[in-house]
Image (tube, grey):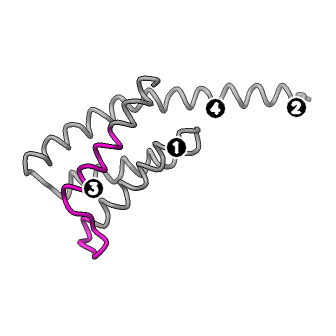
């Protein structure tokens, strides 16, 4: 039977591997979301593009918080909620400029995490 410290070591190694894959995946997500932001800023606001942003933010939100990237998780959650409100055109929906600023803040944080800052 494996001792507790052996189990803890294996668990820590597994978590570090998942964390590394998550950080590595941010480059692709960042690039895709940057392309969407350029389209949105050019006035090509599409519900499909925003739905993609919300879906990515949802994925990032869950994993980031679990893996110790609390600020990234918080920003991703804010973007997910704001995009969903914007798409649903609720009273709580942010203005377009505010939504873009929130997405930009998320992209900046993704870049910082991905580059190790």
Secondary structure category for the residue under label 1 = helix
| Dots 3, 1 in contact, CB < 8 A | no
**Earlier residue among tags 4 and 1:** 4
3D distance between C-alphas at marks 3 and 4: 29 Å
Occupied quadrant, residue 34? top left
| Dots 3, 4 in contact, CB < 8 A | no
The quadrant of the picture occupied by the N terminus is top right
Residue in the picture at 28% in, 43% down: 104
Residue 24 drawn in magenta:
no
Secondary structure category for the residue under label 2 = helix
Disc 2 target residue: 4
Secondary structure category for the residue under label 3 = helix
Secondary structure category for the residue under label 4 = helix
3D distance between C-alphas at marks 2 and 1: 26 Å
Label 2 CA crowd tier, 10 Å (few <14, some 14–19, many 20+): few
Q: Measured from the top left, where is residue 13 in percent x and y?
A: 68, 25
Q: Which mark is residue 51?
A: 3
**Earlier residue among tags 2 and 1:** 2
């Amino acid at each position: 039977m494996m001792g507790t410290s052996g189990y803890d070591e294996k668990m820590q190694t597994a978590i570090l591997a998942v964390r590394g894959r998550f950080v590595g995946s941010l480059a692709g997500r960042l690039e895709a979301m940057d392309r969407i932001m350029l389209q949105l800023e050019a006035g090509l606001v599409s519900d499909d593009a925003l739905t993609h942003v919300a879906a990515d933010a949802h994925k990032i939100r869950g994993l980031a918080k679990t893996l110790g990237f609390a600020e990234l998780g918080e920003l991703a959650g804010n973007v997910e909620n704001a995009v969903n409100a914007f798409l649903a055109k609720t009273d709580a929906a942010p203005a377009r400029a505010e939504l873009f600023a929130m997405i930009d803040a998320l992209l900046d944080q993704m870049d910082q995490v991905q580059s190790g800052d």
